[in-house]
C-alpha cells in the first residue's frame, strides 16, 4: 500500500502491527513508566543526589515521601501529567491489554516485572483527585480522544 494513502484506507493492513504493539511494545513501555514513577516517587534528597556521584559507604536512611508526585513533591509537575496521560490514553486505546497489565496477568516481555501498574495508577489517581483537574476532566472543554491516534 502506498504511504500516501489515508489512515482509513490502510486500516486493515495495520491490524497486525497494532496487535503486535499491544502485545509486545505496550507492556514494555508501561512497565518502564511504572518503574520510573515508582523510583521517582521517592523524595529527592541530598543523599540521593550525592549517591549518584559516589557509591554509598552505608545504606541511606529511609526518607518519607511528602506527596504523591514525582520526587515526593506535594504539587504535580509537567512530567506527572505526561505520565498520567500516557496511562489514560493507553487505557483508552488498548483497554484489554492495559487491564491485563494492571492486574499483572501478562509478562510484558524483556524488562517486565509482572507487578502491575500500581505506581502509575496511583499517580493518575492523585492527579484526578485535584479539584481543578477533576473539573476539567468532567467538563466539555476536554476534547475526546481520537480513536485512531495515541494523542
Image: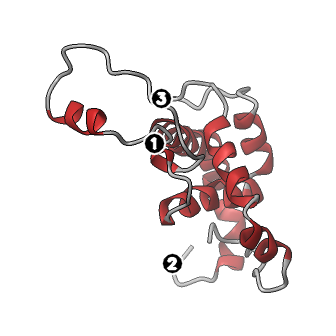
Instruction: Name the residue rendered at 63%, 49% in the picture.
Output: 123
Find disc 1 in the rendering and name its residue. 40
Q: Is residue 117 visible?
A: no
Query: In the rendered view of the protein, which quadrant contains the C terminus?
Result: bottom right
Q: Distance between the residues labelled 2 and 1?
A: 40 Å
Mark 3 in CB contact with mark 2 (< 8 angstroms): no
Q: Point out the tag, 3 or 1, that comes first from the N-terminus.
A: 1
Instruction: Name the residue rendered at 44%, 40% in the picture.
Output: 43
Could you tell me residue 109's position as x and y percent?
54, 29
Q: Residue furthest left?
A: 54
Number of numbered discs overlaid on the protein picture: 3
Check the image and report above or below for 94 versus 77. above
Find disc 2 in the rendering and name its residue. 3
Find disc 3 in the rendering and name its residue. 110
Q: How crowded is mark 3: few (under 14 residues within 10 Å), some or many (20 or more)?
A: few
Check the image and report above or below for 104 versus 84. above
Amino acid at each position: 500500500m502506498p504511504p500516501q494513502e489515508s489512515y482509513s484506507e490502510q486500516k486493515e493492513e495495520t491490524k497486525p502491527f497494532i496487535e503486535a504493539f499491544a502485545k509486545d511494545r505496550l507492556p514494555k513501555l508501561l512497565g518502564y513508566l511504572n518503574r520510573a514513577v515508582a523510583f521517582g516517587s521517592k523524595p529527592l534528597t541530598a543523599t540521593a543526589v550525592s549517591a549518584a556521584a559516589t557509591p554509598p559507604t552505608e545504606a541511606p536512611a529511609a526518607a518519607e515521601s511528602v506527596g504523591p508526585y514525582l520526587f515526593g513533591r506535594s504539587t504535580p509537575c509537567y512530567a506527572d501529567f505526561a505520565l498520567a496521560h500516557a496511562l489514560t490514553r493507553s487505557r483508552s486505546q488498548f483497554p484489554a491489554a492495559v487491564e491485563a497489565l494492571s492486574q499483572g496477568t501478562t509478562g510484558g516481555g524483556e524488562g517486565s516485572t509482572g507487578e502491575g501498574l500500581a505506581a502509575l495508577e496511583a499517580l493518575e489517581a492523585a492527579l484526578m483527585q485535584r479539584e481543578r483537574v477533576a473539573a476539567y476532566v468532567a467538563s466539555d472543554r476536554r476534547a475526546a480522544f481520537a480513536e485512531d491516534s495515541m494523542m
